[in-house]
Amino acid sequence: MKDSLKTFSIAMFATLIVVVSFSFRPSPAPQATNYEFFQFSTIESVIPGGLGRSRILTTDNKGQLLEKDLKNFYSMVGLNFKNIANNDNAIVERINDYTNEGWELVSVVTGSHAQTSDGSSSGGLFITRYLFRRAK
């Protein structure tokens, strides 16, 4: 009986040492991911009468500026909701193209600029920047 108790105690002690030694092993350090970044901008005109210029602006990897026309928010009769919907579709299509190429949209920043003269607003523009990244 004493030998059985001694064998059992030694087995439990050995098991405890094994469990404790694996419990305090450091986890592997996370690997830092290197990313490349890409950005495109939209400029949407809010000049009455449809006289503004609205664009999607992209600079390719060779430094060339690529432009795609967007519709102006205003037409000759006022705010044009069909133009806004067309712009939304063009922008979402561009975002989908880049995500299909492996880019991840990480930030969207907006701004606006009002053109004023003599205290009255004669229009302005909205600018939105879309920042993407993907692992190198």
Image: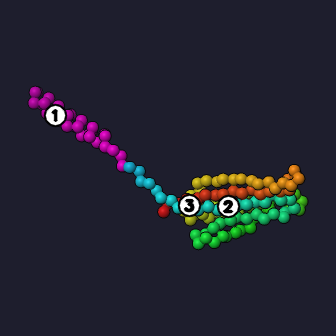
**Residue occupying image coordinates x 73% and y 60%:** 43
Query: As shown in the figure, which amino acid type bears the numbered disc 1?
Result: Ile
Label 3's element?
A: strand
Closer-to-camera residue (2/66): 66
Residue 126: x %, y % from top left: 75, 56
What is the magenta range? 1-28
Of marks 2 and 1, the one in the foreground: 2
Cα–Cα span, label 2 and label 3: 14 Å
Residue 49: x %, y % from top left: 87, 62
Query: As shown in the figure, which amino acid type bears the numbered disc 3?
Result: Phe
Label 1's element?
A: helix
**Residue occupying image coordinates x 59% and y 72%:** 62
Q: Is residue 80 visible?
A: no
**Residue occupying image coordinates x 31% and y 43%:** 25
Residue at the spot of label 1:
10
Q: Do residues under tags 2 and 3 come within 8 Å of each other at their CB atoms?
A: no
Query: As shown in the figure, which amino acid type bears the numbered disc 2?
Result: Ser
70 versus 25 height, above or below: below
Horizontally, residue 126 falls left or right of residue 60, namely: right
Residue 44: x %, y % from top left: 76, 60
